[in-house]
Image (cartoon, helix red, strand yellow):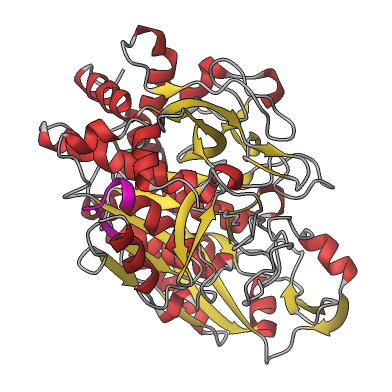
Amino acid sequence: MRGVLALASLAILAAASCSSPQPTTPAPVSQNLSSPTPLLKTAIAQAAHLGRAGTATQVDLSLGLKARSPDRLARLIASGQTVTPEQYAAEFGPDPVKVLAALGALTSVGLHADWRTGSALIAAAGPAPAVAALFGVDIESYRLGNGTTFYASLDAPTIPPAMAAVVSSVTGLDNYRHLHAYAVRPGGLTPTDVLAFYNLKPLRDSGLDGSGITIVLPEIDDLPNLTDLDKFATMFSLPPYGPLLTLKRDPLWGTPMKPQGETVLDLEIIHQIAPAAKLVVYFSAPDFAHADRAFDQMISDHLGSIISESLGACEPDTPSGHRNTYAAIQDRAVAQGMSHFVASGDSGAYTCGEDQDPAGSVPATLPTVTTVGGTTVFESVQGLYFKERAWGSPIDESGTGGGPSQFYPMPEYQKNVAQSSGHGQRHVPDVSAAGDPATGFHVVFGAKDGQVGGTSASTPLWAATIALVNQDLKKRGMRQVGFANPALYWMGANQASFTAKPFHDVTTGNNLLFDAGTGWDFATGWGSMDGAALDAAWILYIKGGGA
């Protein structure tokens, strides 16, 4: 996910999921932090066994709650209609009476439990022996060769009868597997370059700047101050961040990692495209249980209509509890009319490592999100669009994520692009944009100028573009984008009929396994955006009734 002028790449944040806690010191230039670390079973086999986790080990859990009227909710999502957060809570939120019974069952065995009205999960915590006894699992402690300790259970939890009426899943039975941001780092494309390259300048020249639109971002690395952001804004004559930026924290969401540059990257890319859009960051610890809590609150608050998420984890190594809890919360986001853009990953088709079978990233493989891949960009001598290739670098085993899901079936909107190698499963990515670190974005981090790439860069670029589209739709008295995929696939299927095509079809390159080709492909989806043409196509889509 990066930039144009770099000769060397410096990783500022791991692109892999499934990893142990991240180092807090800057990576040396020669170190590549984007290589996936061992899966949980492999890590356990390599670690020293310290015995059963004792009372000194606190386990933080997130318990997913069942929605009411799930069939009616599924019909609502399929119809493209939306409801307000209040309507969702009244019609589809978990049954409060059953939630209170579950809270009682948790506290009766010595766990602390917290539920906020409308939330799709219970936050619970307590000593490992109490958690193990309640859910019928064995929780053991381990130490890796580098001294890092972790606890884990490979057992499937059993939901006690007193909770089974409302609890659907349990997340947090290990603290080894983490979400990680998809950013690779070595300067780079400037805001002027990006606006010209993706034909966004006509939208900005027409007065579209993101005013009245809010983008929300889940993040796992901290932002200690606004110094870097202010320097970036001043350098490129952008508005100051202060009046636009809100930072959300809560003890229930845990403590984020020390600054790694991911949050800075996301905010700087969005601001250069939609400089008047408001930005709300939800910080959490990188483990699944805490991240689920922050994500749930983000959807409950519904402060913005667009989500930009540069996080992910190896799909087959992600616990089913996290996948199910996250998917249920995301259903609520879709039902409430939110657009959610997610990075596809930076390890090509091998999110879990090249020594593992090809696999995608969670939540990128969810059918209810818009997944963004990465490209290598080539500007014309005038700084305009020339061409793009799918990002794939076999030397350092990096590249745009893409391939079929192992868990989620193909959604209806993808039936016309089904690939035989996808075996009827959800295909990713949906779209792409600049991601290769060799052709990445100019950023300011740690008071220094740098160049950054990864699908962590292409994702906020798409989110900011949709902020401009939403602003235009609002000005015209039309509904906002909401779940983007039905419209994107309609545009892709009808691209030949547009005077100006909404996508740049990327037909060369690969993601270390899948080749780019004409039309939709596993390397780049439909390709990257032509901003002005995309906006015009969206207006036609909505005027036509969304079909």
Left or right: residue 379 compared with residue 141 = left
Left or right: residue 124 compared with residue 302 = right
Left or right: residue 39 compared with residue 300 = right
Q: Residue 245 at what x, y percent from top left?
A: 27, 65
Rendered view: 363 above or below 57:
above
Q: Residue 169 at what x, y percent from top left?
A: 56, 59
Query: Which residue: 73% across, 63% down?
Result: 31
Rendered view: 127 above or below 296:
below
**Image quarter for residue 474?**
top left
Mark yes or no: residue 106 visible. Answer: yes
Q: Residue 327 at what x, y percent from top left?
A: 49, 49
**Image quarter for residue 234?**
bottom left
Foreground: 38 or 390?
A: 390
Direction front: furthest residue:
381
Q: Residue 486 at what x, y percent from top left?
A: 39, 26
Direction bottom: furthest residue:
56
Foreground: 260 or 287?
A: 260
State the extent of the magenta-drawn residues as a range.
Answer: 272-279
The verdict on residue 274 being magenta is yes
The verdict on residue 404 being magenta is no
Foreground: 398 or 429?
A: 398
Query: Which residue: 56% across, 72% down?
Result: 61
Mark yes or no: residue 73 visible. Answer: no
Query: Which residue: 19% across, 20% down?
Result: 543
